[in-house]
Amino acid sequence: MGAVLSNDHFVYTSGKHGSVYVNKDALYPHPNQSSEVGELFAQKYRDHKVQVIVAPALGGIVLSQWAAYHLTKMTGRKALGIYTEKGPEKRQTLTRGYDQLVRDKRVLVVEDVLTTGQSVKYAVEAVTKAGGYVLAVCAMINRDPDHVTSETVGAPLSSLGILKAEAFDPESCPYCTLGISVNTSIGHGRQFLEQQLKK
């Protein structure tokens, strides 16, 4: 499926650079495999009486839907699958009336890949602000379990898998220093280069 790429120069959503990229977009066109990941989330939290599953847009949306589907099927209790969107200052916010759906509800936040944890941290804050109770955050992959922790995201954190990989600020990126071209077809390399041209 080509979901894990290595030995290249990638720019992540966070803006950091590295040589390993978890291409979750390679998973999403395959509903059977996406469903299996959602089922893993549901199995992990089936006994937590989750009522709503929230994911930060964009990548986690598919996972929230499949996790809610499987959790409902496993437990016989209806679970909703919704998402937050980037609002002002790139913080995740509940829009479309979704804030009403989390109020006084037990919420699981799911995400595809954690690099810095900022998106899920903001999703946790959005749910809490709307009056929801965040039971936990669970990611498909945590790339930096030493720094992306329960404390940094603001809720109990777990993941289905860990794939440790270094991530560098652009100023200290060894691949930039060596003049290795940024991959512009996968990740956020194209946007990074466009920003560099504007400077």
Image: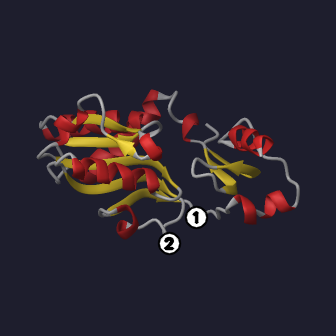
**Residue 121 vs residue 74: left or right?**
right
**Residue 125 vs residue 20: left or right?**
left
Residue farthest to the front, as pictured: 199
Q: Does the residue at mark 1 contact the one at mark 2 (Cβ under 8 Å)?
A: yes
Q: Residue at x 69, y 57 (%)?
A: 18
Disc 1 or disc 2, which is closer to the eye?
2
Residue 174 placement (x, y as % from top left): 79, 64
Query: The residue under label 2 is which amino acid type?
Result: Asp
Gap in angstroms between the C-alphas marked 1 and 2: 9 Å
Quadrant of the rendered structure where residue 83 is?
A: top left
Q: Which mark is residue 164?
A: 1
Residue farthest to the right, as pictured: 179
Q: Label 2 neighbourhood size at 10 Å, few (<14), some (14-19), many (20+)? A: few
Location of the N terminus (image quadrant): top right
Residue farthest to the bottom, as pictured: 146
**Residue 23 vs residue 76: left or right?**
right
Residue 193 placement (x, y as % from top left): 76, 42
The residue wearing badge 2 is: 146
Q: Secondary structure at mark 2?
A: loop
Quadrant of the rendered structure where residue 70 is?
A: top left
Q: Residue at x 56, y 35 (%)?
A: 25
- In the foreground, 97 or 145: 97
